[in-house]
Image (cartoon, coloured by chain):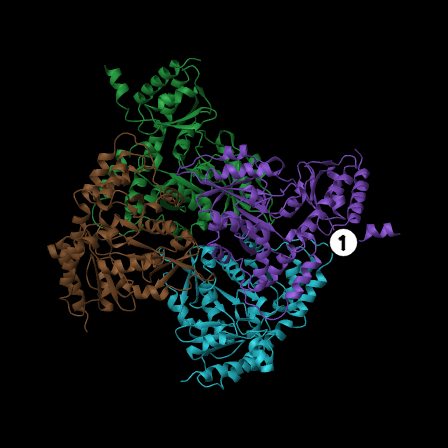
Chain colours: A cyan, B purple, C green, D brown
Amino acid sequence: MVLLNCFVMKPSRSFASDNNAVVHPEVLEAIRRANQGHVVGYGDDPHTESAVGKFREQFGADVGVFFVFNGTAANVLSLQALTRPFHAVLCPELSHIYTDECGAPEKFTGCKLVPLAAPGGKLTVETVAHAYHGIGDQHHVQPRVISITQSTEMGTVYKPAEIEALARFAHERKMFLHMDGARISNAVAAQRLSLRQATRDLGVDVLSFGGTKNGLMGVEAVVFFRPELVEDFLFVRKQGMQLASKMRYMSVQMEALLTDDLWRRNAEHANRMARLLEQEVKKIPRVKIVYPVEANGVFAQIPREAIKKIQERYFFYVWSEEESVVRWMCSFDTTEEDVREFTEFVGTVVRDFPN
Amino acid sequence: MVLLNCFVMKPSRSFASDNNAVVHPEVLEAIRRANQGHVVGYGDDPHTESAVGKFREQFGADVGVFFVFNGTAANVLSLQALTRPFHAVLCPELSHIYTDECGAPEKFTGCKLVPLAAPGGKLTVETVAHAYHGIGDQHHVQPRVISITQSTEMGTVYKPAEIEALARFAHERKMFLHMDGARISNAVAAQRLSLRQATRDLGVDVLSFGGTKNGLMGVEAVVFFRPELVEDFLFVRKQGMQLASKMRYMSVQMEALLTDDLWRRNAEHANRMARLLEQEVKKIPRVKIVYPVEANGVFAQIPREAIKKIQERYFFYVWSEEESVVRWMCSFDTTEEDVREFTEFVGTVVRDFPN
Amino acid sequence: MVLLNCFVMKPSRSFASDNNAVVHPEVLEAIRRANQGHVVGYGDDPHTESAVGKFREQFGADVGVFFVFNGTAANVLSLQALTRPFHAVLCPELSHIYTDECGAPEKFTGCKLVPLAAPGGKLTVETVAHAYHGIGDQHHVQPRVISITQSTEMGTVYKPAEIEALARFAHERKMFLHMDGARISNAVAAQRLSLRQATRDLGVDVLSFGGTKNGLMGVEAVVFFRPELVEDFLFVRKQGMQLASKMRYMSVQMEALLTDDLWRRNAEHANRMARLLEQEVKKIPRVKIVYPVEANGVFAQIPREAIKKIQERYFFYVWSEEESVVRWMCSFDTTEEDVREFTEFVGTVVRDFPN
Amino acid sequence: MVLLNCFVMKPSRSFASDNNAVVHPEVLEAIRRANQGHVVGYGDDPHTESAVGKFREQFGADVGVFFVFNGTAANVLSLQALTRPFHAVLCPELSHIYTDECGAPEKFTGCKLVPLAAPGGKLTVETVAHAYHGIGDQHHVQPRVISITQSTEMGTVYKPAEIEALARFAHERKMFLHMDGARISNAVAAQRLSLRQATRDLGVDVLSFGGTKNGLMGVEAVVFFRPELVEDFLFVRKQGMQLASKMRYMSVQMEALLTDDLWRRNAEHANRMARLLEQEVKKIPRVKIVYPVEANGVFAQIPREAIKKIQERYFFYVWSEEESVVRWMCSFDTTEEDVREFTEFVGTVVRDFPN
């Protein structure tokens, strides 16, 4: 009876994306607490000051911190701060900035984004070096930024030395290293580092610090590790349509995330659920994990016919039609029960289809 | 003792801006209610469908409705939908899009904004006609949009016939009428019309529908009254960095605003407080109201020396240094007591300064 | 008989614009001479080196010189080199960049152009100071460039001290002074200065140096007086679609213009013809010169009904419909006979119309 | 003695690029003839009317024809006419618009250019179909234009059926087919077709018609085969900084090119020289032709050490450092003697280097 019911009612949580999750209760409570009296708009309020202070505790007293509405904006405005329109941004061919932002980086910065092959989602010095050419040639866009995603779009995590090498390569050529950290907390939690150790200390110049996918309602931060880049960013943000009038409600979300290590608690939990998911689905015959599960995403090759059937009950995205690879993401609110029910269902469906 | 205290502690609400206000409790409650289970991101969720439905009830079943993060984006993306880069947008010289958006409209659309004199904040057919020239001349940008603000930046309200005349002028020349309705609710409430009567029925083509200044946390809507304009707007919004991943939290705010006429209740209250404020400050010698108080803003010329003194206690903006004019805004959470304490304080300060 | 003929055949030269003129024979001869053998494209050829050398003789050994196709490009790319998109360019409301370039400056730079009242075509420190505000305010575009036109669009000429004052104002505020010198030769010839004395020595930072209106086929130069601005300009020009492949044919034109003072000879002649024209038309009753004739343009208020009649024979532009003001330009190939025939005709027509 | 001399003096013509060539005498003569009397600027002159008429004779009475300064502009403005910024342009990864225009297409149109593998320089329906995805998905740029180069950057020529297939694919999906015809004359001459048969009749929507590489001083034309695309292009061109004031000097070049089949005579000659060059260098051991020689370019793999030695005497470009492939272009002014001297020299140098 219960089982039947379970097949009739859709489950309340899926594995489609960490942005399908709710807002963490501590974040909602922070919003509620902030909801009294008037405060000045556009960031000149005590909540924002306090939230920025939390970032300084994590990353150093001299960082520049700016809140924006979403990850696309964090990335695009970071790049705008680092480039002029004749510059090029070197990035993985499957990176979010290249494939999933509807050309926003090109439109706003005027730059060319150069897509580089990146198996497992990671750029290497070798790949980047190969694309570093045409320097000083007026016919060619001039490479200016290397942009990496941590954790990557494939759920893998750059090792510290890999990032250091890219930063060194960049800095020796007057280039910058940008990190799309939509899921930086998942990477840092996985590596048991501090936020600073995993970013600034490795040579990252600008970080898109993700909040939304890790329990916030909708806030990301652009964090500058080079004070000289900060000067004009207030104008870049406003002209980029990313300045909130009631800023306090964004700031308190970030403040909550950096309070009592909520960012790490949420990320660790999501990562743990992904490892559990991996472990469970690996037991199912004809399901193959295609990337190392190093953060909160699981990429699996499954029988093509099973996909649709599973999606009737659980919403999720197909990563590669051609290879029959699907993406399953865990989030801070994923429960062990969610994972077990899901993998049980997947197992049932897959086994239903004959070889 | 109480009085003394009142002069020592800062008041919890000021008259700086309606965006200094809190989030209305009904809105916060709607957010709280929506905070359970997973829903698909980017707007394909039932909350968004329901919120859009509320707009259709108000404006007609065929309107296109898109939520964005702030007023700058609502305006800029509206203009982007209506123009190509060689077009011109005719607007008041003190309009928000011309003076307060850090050039975001020019940057994103590539268009020239043509500033027109607009006493009291209102464009007239005569002013617009004077700027309508160079048609077909390849050296000149081509007028394409008339953009008006309702209620205006000076707290005045266009009469229906004034808007109709501008719409007619525009449509006879293949131009569009855009309305920056950051405070459209205040205007509509003041005129005792329906939202539709005050916009679409007058010939407005695209409306930036304001929520944030009327009790939301931070959501505005772009509302298209011409279905043929809608087609590509999903891409315009995404490329404009204005697509929320956790959209449900924006949608439920708008849904709450359009439920049980919260938009009108909030706006009527703010308007009433502005009229009370006007009435009270008019009693103070040497304070002169400079624009008709038709919505929720009061613009007053006060003795120059008094400004700083009042600002020590109450934060607000000087509208014109040269003319010694200040702007005082009321919001849905302004209380009668707030108004009385404020005007009492203003009176005390002004009277302190000898003629 | 001859007179009759003269009324039947259109005259071969009009007073519409100095860009209606032919190419000076010395320039055409330079092109012919350059037309042998292969040379490397895109500016790495000996003709370009030689032409740049001529500029260095005039302006100093450290100037950066870049040839572009037209005046719009010279202006727009100059501004692009000096700005980021959140900057503002302060310019006369009737300047070419503001009114006659179809929004190219806004489209390419992303900046706002701020139109300032400029009677007689000239900005003053007072006007500019009034528009210099909102500094550091994230809502406002940040003034970065003052752009002036020399000689002005009204045929007047800034005095050296007027330019120096604007340059000082700019530099004290980390702003730049750009000069649209589409007719710089006419201004310099009128003032009996050297090119350098009239530009760089007065504090101009970047000069759009005009060639086309002074006898070339179609070349302008962007001249940088601050070496630090030069670095990236090769890329700006190419990305701005202004790099000629067969550059030698542009370079030799400029070289010819700077050889044996052709620039000054042409400009002086055009100026002299304008003075003659002024002198002659002043004799006609009901014709009023409205701006001082200081370069090669004559602006005259004439009876409204006469305009069309004169235009049947001589093509020229109406400067102000409302004021019935017309613009008559002289060029290097205007002859004294052209002027006399024209003024005679104007006189006949005007006198035909009763008061 | 003569031979010695020949090795001491640099040859007057190289094989670097067809844009290193001179201007054809008939073109220069046309310019000379046009150099008398005043004509109205910006294209409203009889020379331009006549030149446009020549295009209509070739392509049909309803084509829109616009002259611009260079090939980059012809391509970029064509794309601007066809797109909105959220569109994508599918093009070969080594196409001129993708690699050699310093990001001008992205900067001006805001679009993403999607680089596709194109062996021999040619796109196929299969390649394009593979890149045609994400339709209607707001996260993805929307494919709008297929851009091909004829003759290609590798000196090959699309067959009519190949172009027809691409056009059909495009039109079935509301996409456009743009042709970068910087060397269209070479392709058409090679195929013994008419200009129309090789473009419009195959389904091309917009053509960048090249003149500069085929004997002009510097003019290209944007030719629209769909009248509905023409309407706004005057503004696109002006805003794109591509409107010449002394237009007559551009128009007469194009008129000369389309008179007495000069375009075909020049192209046929260049093609014949390329075939001769191919034939001669094929005789040299260790020189390998890498692409079919179908127009006026010869791509050869030669011993790495020989390149520098040959370049000491003849300037040309290395196409691929890695593969040791060089590019040799013939132009209308290449002589048989040029080819024989060059190939003799190449042979001598290559044979000098031991295996």
Horizontally, residue A101 falls left or right of residue D146, namely right
Residue D190: percent from left, percent from top = 17, 55
Query: Disc 1 designates what residue?
Result: B12
Residue A13: percent from left, percent from top = 58, 73
Nearest the eye: B324 or D348: B324
Identify which amino acid the numbered label 1 is placed on.
Ser
Nearest the eye: B220 or D100: B220
Residue at figure coordinates x 22%, y 59% from the top left: D159
Residue D93: percent from left, percent from top = 33, 63
| Residue lying farthest to the right in this orientation | B1
Nearest the eye: B80 or C173: B80
Residue at figure coordinates x 62%, y 38% from the top left: B159
Chain containing the residue with disc 1: B
Res B115 visible: no
Residue at figure coordinates x 75%, y 48% from the top left: B314
Q: Quadrant of residue C183?
A: top left
